[in-house]
Amino acid sequence: MIKVNEYFDGKVKSLALENKEGLVTVGVMEHGEYEFGTSTVEYMTVISGGLTVLLPEKSEWKDYGPFETFIVDKDTKFKVKVDGQTAYKCVYK
C-alpha cells in the first residue's frame, strides 16, 4: 500500500512504498530550511532541483544536484536548504 506523508505544514510531501529496494519514499520540498531525523541509514538522491545539506558531524554545507546521492547514518539529524521546488528519492536501509 502506498502511504502519503506530509511534513512542515505541507512544504514537504512524500509517497512511501516497498519494493525490491526495501522501503522507499519519493517526495517534493518547497523552498525553505528543514531538519530531519533518521531511524535507519538513508540514501537520499536528488531527482530534480537541488539541496544544500549539512550532514551530522560536518561543519560545511554541501550542494547536491540531480542524480547526486548522499548517505545519512541512522539515529542522527541532518539539515537541508531548498532554494526552489525539489524532488527526491530516499531509500531506507
Image (spheres, rainbow, N blue to C red):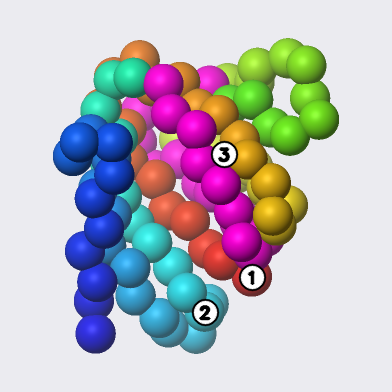
Q: Is residue 11 visible?
A: yes
Whether residues under marks 2 and 1 lie with C-beta atoms below 8 angstroms apart, the answer is yes
Q: Which residue is mark 3?
A: 68
First in sequence: mark 2 vs mark 3:
2
Which is more toward the observer, 47 or 28? 28
Which part of the image, by quadrant, shows the C terminus?
bottom right
Where residue 78 appears, as percent x and y from the top left, is 61, 35
User: Is there a contact, CB below 8 Å, between mark 2 and mark 3?
Assistant: no
**Label 3: element kind:** loop
Mark 2 vs mark 3, CA separation in Å: 20 Å
Residue underneath mark 1: 93
User: Which residues make up the magenta segment?
Assistant: 33-52
Magenta stretch: helix, strand or loop mostly: strand
Say whether residue 64 is visible: no
Of the residues shown, which amino acid type is indicated by label 3?
Glu
Of tags 2 and 3, which is closer to the observer? 2
* Residue 24 locus on image (x, y percent): 44, 68
